[in-house]
Image (cartoon, grey):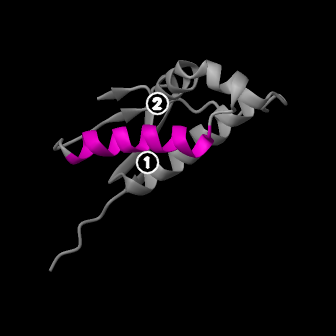
């Protein structure tokens, strides 16, 4: 179980805080580091459960770091759900199935 993607992204961004001030850390680089780590774990595991928070339902303040965080989190969510066999949205403790991989017979 990987808990939680939002914390993982925050840690990755703030691990390179000096880069934000001096060089503007490349968004693609952050995305790739996180995605590659998740993919590596998934490739060597029989099952992975990844937990994340949906923080993109609220308006994003015009702050460069907040906008970058939101963009990266949204792109990671999309990539992970495309890759995943199933995806659930949990609202008030109720799991809602959003995607289910159907094995085709043959």
Looking at the image, which is closer to me, 74 or 87?
74
Q: Within 10 Å of the Cα at label 2, are there few (<14), some (14-19), or many (20+) other Cα atoms?
A: some
Q: Within 10 Å of the Cα at label 1, are there few (<14), some (14-19), or many (20+) other Cα atoms?
A: some
Name the spot of residue 6 as percent of width and height, x first: 52, 27
Place residue 42 in its image quadrant: top left
Q: Which residues are magenta?
A: 26-43
> Residue farthest to the right?
62
Name the spot of residue 45 as percent of width and height, x first: 18, 41
Name the spot of residue 57 as percent of width and height, x first: 69, 35
Place residue 69 in its image quadrant: top right
Which residue is tagged 2?
5
- On the rendered image, what quadrant is the N terminus found in? top left
The residue drawn where x is 17% and y is 75% is 105
SS at circle 2: helix
The residue drawn where x is 21% and y is 42% is 47
Q: Report if the CB atoms under discs 1 and 2 are less than 8 Å apart.
A: yes
Name the spot of residue 8 as percent of width and height, x first: 46, 26
Q: Is residue 92 magenta?
A: no
Q: Which mark is residue 80?
A: 1
Q: With respect to residue 77, does 60 lie above or below?
A: above
């Amino acid at each position: 179980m990987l808990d939680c993607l939002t914390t993982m992204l925050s840690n990755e961004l703030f691990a390179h805080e000096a880069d934000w001030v001096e060089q503007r850390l490349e968004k693609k680089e952050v995305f790739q580091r996180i995605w590659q780590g998740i993919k590596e774990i998934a490739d060597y595991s029989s099952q992975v459960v990844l937990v994340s928070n949906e923080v993109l339902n609220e308006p994003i303040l015009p702050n460069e770091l907040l906008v970058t965080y939101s963009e990266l989190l949204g792109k990671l969510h999309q990539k992970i759900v495309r890759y995943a066999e199933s995806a659930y949205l949990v609202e008030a403790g109720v799991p809602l199935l959003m995607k289910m991989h159907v094995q085709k017979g043959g």
